[in-house]
Image (cartoon, rainbow, N blue to C red):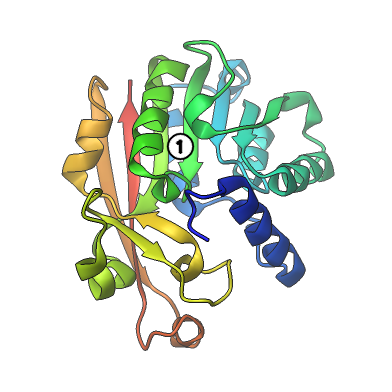
Amino acid sequence: MSLASDPKQLWDDSFEEAIALEAYNTAPVEALVRTVSYYFRGRYTPEALRDLHFLEMGCGAAPNLVWLARKGVRVSGIDISPKALALGRANLAHHCVGERVGDLVEGSVAEAPFPDASFDGIIEACVFQHLDRQTRLKTFAEVRRLLKPGGIFVGYMLERGHTIFQRKQAEQLPEDPGSLLLEDGSSKIHLSNIGLAHFFSAEELHELLTGFSVVDPCLTTYYLPREEAAKRGYDEYLQSMWTVHAVK
């Protein structure tokens, strides 16, 4: 099943398998933590963070929201998967940060049910890379709509130096360069079997974030341990990711 056919079912299935294997994220994404922390430094005192409201688009099990809430930031999230949201709610409750939680809603990141200029910051990690072209364009437009002037967007998404793209780039969708349909029959927690995956270029990210005062895609690369690479069918597996720092 491709991602476009029924995204809610695909992500529910993925989270069901991740829960069974205890393979879902329990720690915040390092690249997001680092980049948001850089933004906070010199701009806000620890006390002033309590005045900020951040949204995570595709919040999943919510470890990123837990990190923000523990710093004092008010947090909200949206995710298409009910199973992911249940996990996220439980995780936030477990860390006793309920007083810093705004809205956790089920829905599409392309049609977020929040008013214009609602948020001081928006984050996403490995979500926008699984949207088809039309949905991707609408979602970046939502980021622009939902951010306050001067607000920050930090995204973590696939880059074209990634091992899978380098191996399969001849199979790019002709109507959407940079996109692959990845369905190898392995675990649904692996990129290689998650359906549509889009590998961004720097030029594309600048276009998608037109009108922002700062657009700074920062390249992050690292190799998986060979044992883990072998589980995914590769002798060597390079994760090549953009950490996108953008200010409206």
Residue at 16 percent across and 42 percent down: it is 203
x then y, percent, for residue 230: 46, 87
Q: Is residue 181 left or right of residue 11?
A: left
Rendered-image quadrant of the C terminus: top left
Residues 3 and 145: in front is 3
The amino acid beneath tag 1 is Val
Residues 15 and 29: in front is 15
Question: Which residue lies under the disc numbered 1?
Answer: 36
Q: Residues within 10 Å of mark 1 (few under 14, many from 20)?
A: some
Quadrant in the picture for residue 208: top left
Residues 157 and 63: in front is 157
| Number of callouts | 1
Residue at 30 percent across and 72 percent down: it is 163
Q: Against 220, is 118 above or below?
A: above
Quadrant in the picture for residue 47: top right
x then y, percent, for residue 91: 77, 46
Q: Is residue 108 left or right of residue 69?
A: left
Residues 236 and 105: in front is 105
x then y, percent, for residue 30: 49, 53
Residue at 52 percent across and 52 percent down: it is 29
Residue at 53 percent across and 35 percent down: it is 57
Circle 1: element type: helix
x then y, percent, for residue 12: 67, 53
Q: Is residue 14 left or right of residue 3?
A: right
Residue 129 visible in rendering: yes
